[in-house]
Image (cartoon, rainbow, N blue to C red):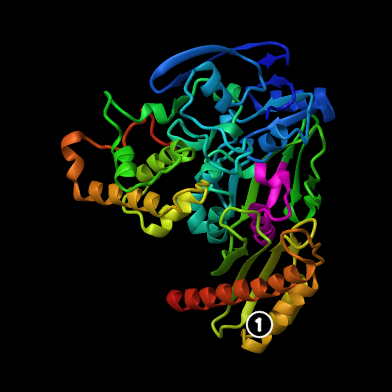
Amino acid sequence: MKPAAFDYLRPSTVEEACQYLQEYGEEGKLIAGGQSLVPILNMRLSTPECLIDISGLEELKYIREEGDWLHIGALTRQRDVERSALVREKTPLLAEALPYIGHMQTRNRGTFGGSLVHADPTAEIPLSLLALQAAVVIQSVEETREVNVEDFFITYLTTDLMPNEMLREVKIPIGSIPKGYSFQEYSRKHGDFALVSAACVLDVDEQERITSVRLTLGGVDAVPVLARDVEGLILGEKLTDSLLLEASRAAAADVDPEGDLHASREYRLHLAQVFAARVLETAYHRAVLGKGSAT
Amino acid sequence: MQVKREERYSLRLQVNGKRYEEQVEPRKLLSDFLREDCGLTGTHVGCEHGVCGACTVLVDGRAVRSCLVLAIQAEGADITTVEGLAKDGKPHPLQEAFAEFHALQCGFCTPGILMSSVEFLQTHADPGKEEIADMLSGHLCRCTGYKGIVEAVQQLADRRKEGEERESGDPVSICSRTTPTV
């Protein structure tokens, strides 16, 4: 198996990469870690005229804290995010999600931003960033703009990025870090695409009543889904067994999965409810424990 | 830097401590480069889309699938393949452990598993069976059922912990570069 022939461009700065994108438009395709793109090229599912290799742009490889934001450069390797002490401290949800991505051998090469712009609906990074209310910084020759992750995903493998734009960095708000978090997913074998994945961040007050919650589900629609009805049900409440059941049912009612050869629609709906309940419960317990240790 | 599809690019990199400069098409995969241009056929090519793990090599000290890297992307890199493990005709301790614990049968998947295990042992001082299994989940082996492989890796980690290998130096330190951190 060989990729179809392509012209190869290697810019040495982000500005140069943007100029190439402007010049080549839809004919040009960015390659970073290549862990999703190269299989597609090898199988000739895509035959771009031109590859623009940005994997060497060191200026987009960083993890840093600035004020109330954690900034992660688009070309930071997934493995470096996974092993970052700063990420573990500031966004433990992300640290919990990363080991689920492919395998150590693909995380060594795959980039944080690459997973986001590939926009596979089962992918872990998009799901976590949706829960964390992150934003992305997008650059082109013309402008630099910011988009909330909530508005970034359009449909399967399609994002708000225009052909002349590239992702520069991800910004995660860390001003008030919720004590409760959980990421869990189900796949037949570790490293496979998830059948269903779920992420949750949640906080409680001194009386163990829920003060904030965001629950997201992956693998159940064309894009990662924010379960909006959950918040109204459980905000201001303690998480009892009956409330947990009600909330997880509400979460699963928000999604519209398709069946495929890996799992039927019914099975995915079932998993969505089960995993919504699991991440809610785990996040709640962690939030309560976190509150306990803080006082 | 621009290379047209019909052009050959003069690619320089280092494999197992030896410098190579070869003329490559932009579309050539690193796995094919190692086998065809460097003549290092120990790196096996299985699925060619990143699932089986047979083609795993170390690029600047990190285990990656060489079928998912374009050779041209590895310009200037320091690469270690399975041929780089043995020193002076003596097998690497990990290779000896694989023989001892029957960690291979047909041997097709073995080069990739060895390279992942080398990086794994460098980054895990005291790995548990679960961690070893997690590392191996990126590799398909259809002969062994993995038991022997897990035991071989575990055994080497245990021996290293006990310091038995002191006389022969650190057995898993073979890379000139250490894993970079952000």
A111 or A139, which is in the foreground?
Answer: A111
B163 or A188, which is in the foreground?
Answer: A188
Q: Is residue A68 magenta?
A: no
Percent from the top left, x then y, of residue A291?
Answer: 49, 76
Q: Looking at the image, which residue is at 59% across and 46% down?
A: A71
In this view of the protein, can residue B162 be seen by the observer? yes
Residue A23 lies in quadrant: top right
Query: Which quarter of the rendered picture does the N terminus of chain B lie within?
Result: top right
B124 or A65, which is in the foreground?
Answer: B124
- Seen as rendered, the residue at the extreme left is B167
Percent from the top left, x then y, of residue A107?
Answer: 55, 44
Tally the numbered discs: 1
Q: Say which residue label 1 marks.
A: A244
Q: Looking at the image, which residue is at 29% across and 39% down?
A: B96
Rendered view: B106 above or below B16:
below
Rendered view: B128 above or below B115:
below
In this view of the protein, can residue B182 be seen by the observer? no
Q: Is residue A63 rendered to the left or right of residue A260?
A: left
Instruction: Using the image, name the chain to which the residue with label 1 belongs.
Output: A
Residue B95 lies in quadrant: top left
**Amino acid at circle 1:** Leu
Q: Is residue A133 magenta?
A: yes
Q: Which residues are magenta?
A: A114-137
